[in-house]
Image: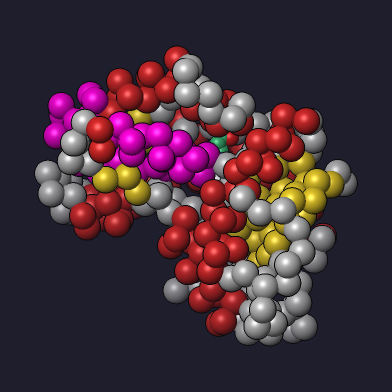
Amino acid sequence: MINQNVDALPNLAHAPIGVFDSGVGGLSVLRHLVQLMPNERYIYYADTKNVPYGNKSADEILFLTLQAVDWLCKKGCKLVVIACNSASAHALTALRERCSVPIVGLVPAVKPACQITQTGQIAVLATQATLQGKLLAQVIDEVATPMGISVYKHFEPMLVPWVEQGMPITHQVADLLIEQTSQWRQMGVDVIVLGCTHYPFFRQFLQAWIDDNAVPMTLIDSGVAIARRVQSLLAVFQIASPDDAPHGEPLQFYASQLTDDVQMTAKRLADMSVSFLVD
Ligand code: DGL
């Protein structure tokens, strides 16, 4: 389904795909995009001056997101991925009305979680902004509720800053994460939805605890599904890159505030060569 009125997009096959997040979290989505479509060019924009978005008001998130996406459109992007659940929750509808290129947004992966739960109890770990947004409420009402599945929502405001700092494992946030996961286990939750694009970066850490404790729990995020969605939209609008081979250029990473820490964390999380730029 294409829920956007986008006219024909001529001559855009060689244009880059824009990827936006408040910080480095959207790189978890970018990695799936590059894996599936290594022949495409990407421009990443991180609003590191304003991260985290998750505890900002809906109006503030809307304002910052419109600004960022306008900027990506001015850079000539042929499609923009809002690789941020918080921004998608509060700006996706406005963006689709405003932009002349396809906009792909994220919603926590409740739908696939409902398909695999055995206990009928799932947990969504996301920012406050995402948990309060209409997109999540809608998917719960349309999918989880009719299936009789209980959805436990939880936010921990320190998670995003922890990822932005490079996730030191000996940190109180790491302990809080394990504590919360044990609580869910006792409640019978068997699927945890990582509903923020920063969270897949601590997936391995959480999975190690799940494996060590033989806990019957699955972690799930939206990265692969978003990459497939982008691929299918490029085909529908006939704007996929005609190149067969990966172009081999570094990722163009722009940030509203480009500190040494941002560069170090982004380099580590991107898992590809990165060119850091300031506009
Ligand atoms: N990575 C973002 C998300 O998916 C933003 C988190 C934040 O800035 O609070 O929600």
Q: Residue at x 47, y 24 (%)?
A: 169
Residue that appears at 33% across and 36% down: 208
Main SS of the magenta part reads helix
Q: Is residue 53 left or right of residue 154?
A: right
Classify residue 57 as left or right of residue 276.
left
| Nearer the observer, 113 or 65 | 113
Q: Answer with left or right where residue 154 lies relative to residue 28.
A: left
Q: Is residue 165 above or below residue 63?
A: above
Q: How is the image coloured?
A: secondary structure
Quick check: 80 left or right of 258?
left
Q: Residue furthest right?
A: 279
Q: Over which residues does the magenta segment extend?
A: 182-210
Query: x and y percent of residue 269 in the render?
Result: 60, 43
Looking at the image, can residue 81 be seen? yes
Q: What residue is drawn where x is 73% and y is 72%?
A: 247
Front position in the image: 47 or 245: 245
Vertical side of 131 occupied by 156: above or below: above
Q: At which x and y percent is residue 64?
A: 70, 40
> Is 202 within the magenta?
yes
Pick whichever, 188 or 74, lies toward us.
188
Residue 186 sits in which quadrant? top left
* Residue 123 x %, y %: 28, 38
Look at the image and say whether residue 154 sits in the magenta stretch. no
